[in-house]
Image (tube, rainbow, N blue to C red):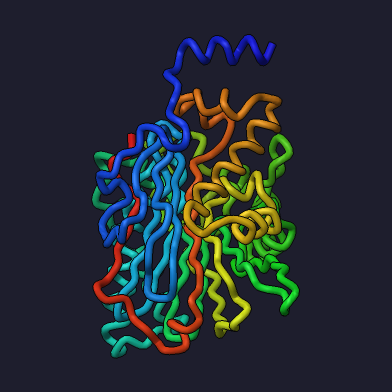
Amino acid sequence: MLQGLMNLLSLCFKPFGHDGENHETNGILGGGSRGGSREGKDGLFWFRDIGKYGSGDFSMTVVQANQVLEDQSQIESGQFGTFVGIYDGHGGPEAARYVCDHLFKHFRAITAESQGVVTAETIERAFRQTEEGFTALVSELWSTQPNMATVGTCCLVGVIYQQTLFIANLGDSRAVLGKKVGNTGGIAAMQLSTEHNANIEAIRHELKELHPNDPQIVVLKHGVWKVKGIIQVSRSIGDVYMKHERYNKEPINRKFRLPEPMNMPILSANPTIISLTFHPNDSFLIFASDGLWEHLSNEKAVDIVHSHPRAGSAKRLVEAALQEAARKREMRYSDLQKIDKKVRRHFHDDITVIVLFFNHDLISRGAVQDPPVSNRSALEHR
């Protein structure tokens, strides 16, 4: 039966190119020096195989599944250090696009106020200003585009400042460090980000403590825990219908409206932030939206990066996730590749991956990227 479905899909959807075919090098992943690296498009993939940033090399890939790409991402590197962002939108692309346009700008403005010094408070303020700006936009558009109140995005940020790494997170994207194990040649996976998803018992406990008088603060629906039975993540930018009562009413869709008054915000935009000092055994860091982690374990992802050349690392991770998604549906990867966006969402989510490789000589010398590097996933994906 499944093969019959795939035969039908093969007739309905145009096949896409495979590796090495139909590549375009028209700046799809934004600006920044290319340095001779391959950058372009391959079917539903957009990629930058390898590039340079202030502390080493990076690899970057996006694969689209939704009708309109809801993921956005960026890597910025210059005098201030390096800033990486993965923004996994939900309900539409608007919140992720807004964050990609504004979060780094706020971060740069705040660091300028403190003579370039970066702290956890710097990052927290940038998140707060971005949330406030998006909420103001929702207010401005309420009479004409009320559904902007139901759009949100997870937000994973990494900042390298001198010899310190900061990781800040809202939602369920993930940052995983590949760390060398002594002189054994082995590699260990270390998750650095804290996730905010109601399927995690600790998050359900946190929500129940914050809302002790609400027995429906988390609800199990079809085997999935959701906040108020509506959304899985407990922290995000946007989703103002779950933060401000004045936006939880008509004319937003009934499925988002709560049956009882909201006496306090249900979702939070306060990120979990950690910092650590680089160690010479820190080899690389994988940033990815949850679409990758639905199909790959931390250990598997780290092993894939460690066991192959740096160039194409991000795309290799995404391909491994898609192969696993196909296996789970008892189909061939080549058949999955033939399925177009929108229908593809039934098989996997939009996936964004950025891999940073660390050059500890550059880090210890406090080297800065000059000229600056700026790479963003394209906004025009449709």
Query: Which quadrant holds the C terminus?
Result: top left
170 lies above or below 351 = below
Q: Residue 203: which quarter of the image?
A: bottom right
Taking the spot 72% from the left edge, 74% from the top edge, the residue there is 181
Please state the horizontal and vertical placement of residue 211, each as a whole percent of the image: 64, 61
**Of the pair 21 and 142, the residue shown nearer to us:** 21
Taking the spot 67% from the left edge, 68% from the top edge, the residue there is 190
**Of the pair 104 and 54, the residue shown nearer to us:** 54
**Of the pair 89 and 10, the residue shown nearer to us:** 10
Taking the spot 47% from the left edge, 55% from the top edge, the residue there is 311
**Of the pair 75 and 147, the residue shown nearer to us:** 75
Q: Is residue 130 left or right of residue 64?
A: left
Please state the horizontal and vertical placement of residue 143, each as a whole percent of the image: 26, 42
Q: Is residue 266 visible?
A: no
- Count of numbered circles in the view: 0
Q: Residue 222: which quarter of the image?
A: top right
Q: Is residue 101 visible?
A: yes
Query: Which quadrant holds the N terminus?
Result: top right
108 lies above or below 131 = below
Q: Is residue 187 left or right of residue 374?
A: right
Please state the horizontal and vertical placement of residue 280, each as a whole percent of the image: 59, 82
